[in-house]
Amino acid sequence: MSGAAAQPPGCRDLRRGASHPCAKLPPVAGPLPFDPIAEAGRHWEERWGAESVAPMRAVTSVMRVHQLLLARLNEALEPHGLTFARYEALMLLFLSRSGSLPLGKIGERLQVHPTSVTNLVDGLERSGLATRSPHPSDRRATLATITDDGRRAAAAATEALNGIAFGTTPLRPKDLDSITRIFRSMRAEAGDFVD
């Protein structure tokens, strides 16, 4: 698309005003001629009653927005050689006191399987953004440690994501605060953290 190269990565057009830096970029896969969640809600109500519609629509909306956000974030991170999953792991190392964390701790914090952590750290290692070494006091554990290149990549990637508000346009700060508050209560109830 002409003019797209001049736009910041990670942005997509969501009926933004012409002044927004990403106003000229197309939607992720092109707009559908109908709202698929509203259509699913109509079918849901016919088959399972009105009381089942709101939960289905809410969860389906979350999952659909998750895919949209992931596409935006990955697009913004691509110039930095990262995916959002690798960015999250890199930021755990970047923000840790020593720049190192056991692989098991990374898995706990990201809520991913040990195999996924291994794959994430493998990718960071191949890119020269992290190293792997034996834990100095626990022979069963392995540490991932951020490199100087990893620190530079983390800072640049974070600047890119902050520049696109982590892909959350057109939401306003108060919308984002509301979303965070609503999901925090669900996370607490599910035992995601101790309040």
Image (cartoon, helix red, strand yellow):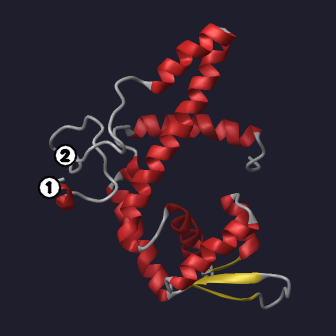
Secondary structure category for the residue under label 2:
loop
Q: Is residue 96 visible?
A: no
> What's under tag 2, amino acid-wise?
Lys
Mark 1 vs 2: CB contact within 8 A = yes
Secondary structure category for the residue under label 1:
loop
Q: Return the x and y of residue 116 as percentages of the image width and height.
A: 68, 66
| Residue appearing at x 20%, y 55% in the figure | 4
Classify mark 2: residues with Cα within 10 Å, few (<14), some (14-19) or many (20+): many
> Image height check: is 91 above or below 20?
below
Q: Return the x and y of residue 1 as percentages of the image width and height.
A: 19, 53
The residue wearing badge 2 is 24
Q: Nearer the viewer, residue 94 or 32?
A: 32
Q: Return the x and y of residue 188 as percentages of the image width and height.
A: 72, 42
The residue wearing badge 1 is 3
Q: Quadrant of residue 169?
A: top left
> What's under tag 1, amino acid-wise?
Gly
| Residue appearing at x 72%, y 69% in the figure | 115
Q: Is residue 103 left or right of residue 67?
A: right
Q: Is residue 39 left or right of residue 111?
A: left
> Image height check: is 62 above or below 108?
above
| Residue appearing at x 39%, y 73% in the figure | 80
Q: Is residue 122 left or right of residue 108?
A: left
Tag count: 2
